[in-house]
Amino acid sequence: MRYVLASGSPRRKELLSKVIGEFEIIPAVSEEESGKQVPSEIVTDLSFQKASEIFNRILMDSSDRLVVIGADTIVSYNHKVLGKPKDRKDAFEMIKSFQGKVHSVYTGITVFYMEEGSAKSFTFSECTDVKVSVMTDEEICEYVNTGESDDKAGAYGIQGVFAKFIEKIDGDYYNVVGLPVARLYKELKNNALI
């Protein structure tokens, strides 16, 4: 079985290694956009685009039994989707908007694979609610200036320095990091892909 992760995220790479021993990393390169409005539909749509791009790109060269995993994560607060910040000012504004409150983190997963000569896929999403402590402007600035927020949905990494501001999570911790490990394992097992 040839497993491919359609993401360059070091966090997803680390988490997928808890499920699959050996896999390749081939990040999707096209700009994904979703016309969806509901957070769970946005992440499943974007994960589908990533997995589809890589599956179709390498299918022609592959005689192996191929499994491609695509993932996308967003943060949603007050009916607004918070993706990766444009800059540090944007990161500051994102964190300021949900500090002291609960926001939701959605990760969509799509798995493409071959079965009896046909391409198949399945998609799912996971949601975790996160409560962030009340933060002063100075604390937000200090955090943003670490650079940790630069490439992360919602402008923070739960597994990093921001951990000290996480009061509570309701749901899968690993989903917030970027890959719902237990759910992915279950879905791969249910589809006889592991």
Image: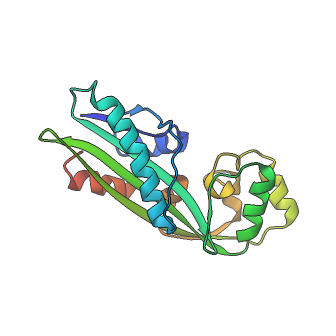
Q: Is residue 14 above or below residue 129?
A: above
Q: Is residue 193 above or below residue 162?
A: above
Give the residue drawn at x 48%, y 63%: 36
Please identify the residue farthest to the right as the structure is shown: 138
The answer to whether residue 21 is left or right of residue 62 is right
Give the residue drawn at x 48%, y 40%: 7
The answer to whether residue 82 is left or right of residue 100 is left
Q: Is residue 98 above or below residue 64?
A: below
Task: Look at the image and tell me in which quarter the C terminus lies.
Answer: top left
> In x, y percent, where is residue 81?
60, 64
The answer to whether residue 126 is left or right of residue 76 is left
Q: Is residue 56 visible?
A: yes
The answer to whether residue 165 is left or right of residue 55 is right
Count the labels in the image: 0
Nearer to me, 190 or 97:
97
Instruction: State which quadrant residue 129 falls in.
Output: bottom right
